[in-house]
């Protein structure tokens, strides 16, 4: 825990689901955390809840930011520096999905998925790379098993997550020379509100958001000489 205490993490899409689970796990390890959402009120409310829940009031800040816009991500990075003085970890988590046959998928839906899930990851890294050079930091992107396994009705989502997986691995090679670590996590079914899902006891077999949070902590605590650059994670026992 001492290795992580007072490190600073920026988590895109950190107000619910996987991002929220990661934020909670990092706060419990003593990090300072900035969470983003397109909606500033949502970001602030989630930060207040997290601060109270983890006894971390003053160590978590909510910021309005749109990953689709580089300038917006640059502003989020600036707010992290203004709030906590440095930036050590960036979790590129924000994402969404539109699903359906290519016959039905609209260009607006396509652009929404690609701009958020793929270009958003580019913007998150591009906006912060100079700061992470200073701290020899860590990037973690949240891809998906859909970034390795295609399925009918998933053309936009598959394209975005295949892109995130490949992009992250190339960035890992680009930034090793700066002693920056880069990993991508590729979860299978996670119990969140993604795509209109409503978490319930029926989804207890799924990966939980806190499981991904624990995985992120494990990555950050790993001996710096070792880099798990791509991690697939799936439910142990899905329904038959």
Image (cartoon, helix red, strand yellow):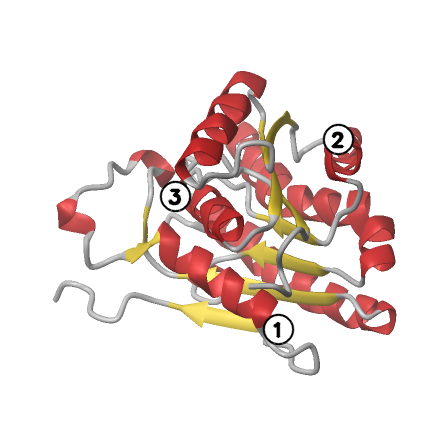
Q: Quadrant of residue 10?
A: top right
Residue under label 2, please give it: 79
Give the residue number, with chain letter if any, for mark 1.
229
Sequence-first disc among 3 and 2: 2
Q: Residue at x 61, y 31 (%)?
A: 61
What number is the disc on residue 206?
A: none
> Which of the image's four quarters has the C terminus?
bottom left
Q: Nearer the viewer, residue 198 or 167?
A: 198
Earlier-in-chain disc, 1 versus 3: 3
Question: Viewed as shown, does residue 207 lie left or right of 178?
Answer: left
* Up/down of 59 relative to 43, above or below: below
Q: Is residue 35 visible?
A: no
The alpha-carbon separation of the residues under discs 1 and 3 comes to 32 Å
Tag 2: Cα neighbours inside 10 Å, few (<14), some, or many (≥20)?
some
Q: Position of residue 230 (x, y in %)?
A: 56, 71
N-terminal label among 2 and 1: 2
Count of marks overlaid on the render = 3
Circle 1 residues within 10 Å: few <14, some 14–19, many ≥20: some
CA distance for labels 2 and 1: 28 Å
Q: Which residue is mark 3?
A: 101
Q: Is residue 129 left or right of residue 213?
A: right
Residue 106 image offset from top left, x and y in percent:
50, 31
- The residue that appears at 75% across and 60% down in the rendered structure is 137
- The residue at 55%/47% (across/down) is 93
Secondary element at image label 3: loop
């Amino acid at each position: 825990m001492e290795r992580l205490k007072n490190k600073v993490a920026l988590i895109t899409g950190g107000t619910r689901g996987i991002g929220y689970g990661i934020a909670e796990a990092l706060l419990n390890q003593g990090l300072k955390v900035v969470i983003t959402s397109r909606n500033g009120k949502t970001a602030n409310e989630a930060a207040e809840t997290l601060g109270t829940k983890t006894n971390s009031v003053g160590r978590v800040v909510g910021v309005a930011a749109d990953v689709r816009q580089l300038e917006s991500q640059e502003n989020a990075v600036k707010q992290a520096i203004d709030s906590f003085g440095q930036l050590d970890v960036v979790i590129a988590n924000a994402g969404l999905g539109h699903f359906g046959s290519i016959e039905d998928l609209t260009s607006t839906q396509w652009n929404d998925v690609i701009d958020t899930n793929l270009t958003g990851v580019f913007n998150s890294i591009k906006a912060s790379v100079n700061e992470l050079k200073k701290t020899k930091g860590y990037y973690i992107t949240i891809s998906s098993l859909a970034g390795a396994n295609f399925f009918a009705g998933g053309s936009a989502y598959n394209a975005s997550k295949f892109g995130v997986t490949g992009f992250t691995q190339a960035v890992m090679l680009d930034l090793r020379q700066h002693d920056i670590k880069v990993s991508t996590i590729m979860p299978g079914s996670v119990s969140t509100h993604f795509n209109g899902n409503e978490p319930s006891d029926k989804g207890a077999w799924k990966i939980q958001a806190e499981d991904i949070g624990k995985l992120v902590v494990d990555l950050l605590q790993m001996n710096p000489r070792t880099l798990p650059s791509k991690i697939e994670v799936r439910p142990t026992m899905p329904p038959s």
